[in-house]
Image (spheres, rainbow, N blue to C red):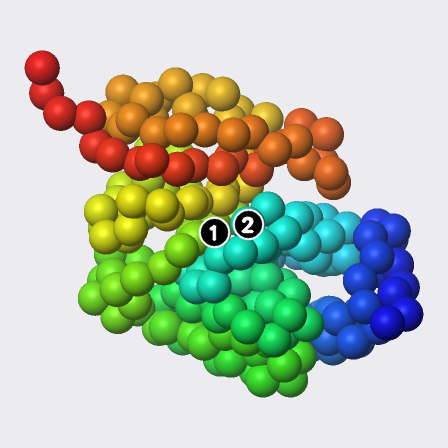
Amino acid sequence: MVVHPVPDIGREVSRETRERLTIFAELFQKWAKSINLVAPSTIAELWRRHIADSLQIQPLYPEAETWIDLGSGGGFPGVISAILLAERGTGWVHLVESNQKKCAFLRTALREAGGRGSVHPVRIEDAPGAIPHCDAISARALAELDLLLAYAEPWAQENAKLKAFFHKGRDYAAEIDKARGRWDFDLVQHQSKIETDSVVLEISGLRRRTSA
């Protein structure tokens, strides 16, 4: 299969995946004119700042079959992961988003780009009732790590092998220290290939600390 670099980042993906990403990008730019999908100042850097950044996640845990993407918003990284899974032909991404307008965009993006995923228009706190099991969780620009771990806890209790992947910016070290006050977890820090001061935190073995 012939591979091509995605515009602006040089990452090689198949022709089919590049076409899917291009469809998504065109839809995103169209919808972003009427609803707030990301900060308007970042739309000009859509490929590098958002798409390329999101392309880092699914390959960090390629064997995961079922993903949950929390606060999917403009589709990052959830729709991008769903597009990568479409090339593989297996796996599924459950996108959790409570904003109805954003849900409409996400459904359209998955349908038009052929991503392997579905949209759940529920609050994150209610999502475990709708999606009882997953292998992996992702979230980007959503909340502090301490809160993200609280969101992930129900699935971690159900699956001891769960891994969570959270994009974090330059203040991630302080967030880790704060989270250690309430949680025990194993941590791998993946340096972002897109932003020099950003990381992807890989969390496993999540468990709430018990009082002494």
Any part of residue 50 in sight: no
In the figure, is residue 74 to the left or right of 30? left
At a point 43% along the width and 64% down the height, the residue shown is 66
Question: Where, by quadrant of the figure, is residue 122 drawn?
Answer: bottom left
Find residue 99 and report its horizontal and vertical position in percent: 40, 68
- Residue linked to disc 2: 61
Question: Where, by quadrant of the figure, is residue 195 drawn?
Answer: top right
- Residue linked to disc 1: 138
In the figure, is residue 120 to the left or right of 167? left
- The tag on residue 154 is none
- The one nearer the camera, 198 or 202, is 202
Q: Report helix, strand or loop for mark 2.
A: loop
Position of the N terminus by quadrant? bottom right
Q: Looking at the picture, does residue 182 appear above or below residue 46?
A: above
Position of the C terminus by quadrant? top left
User: Callout 2, which amino acid?
Assistant: Tyr
Residue at mark 1 to residue at mark 2: CA–CA distance: 11 Å
- The one nearer the camera, 103 or 128, is 128
At a point 36% along the width and 59% down the height, the residue shown is 134
- The one nearer the camera, 35 or 143, is 143
Find residue 57 and report its horizontal and vertical position in percent: 59, 50
> Which of the two labelled residues, at mark 1 and mark 2, occupies the earlier sequence position?
2
At a point 58% along the width and 84% down the height, the residue shown is 111
Any part of residue 12 in sight: yes
At a point 74% along the width and 57% down the height, the residue shown is 46
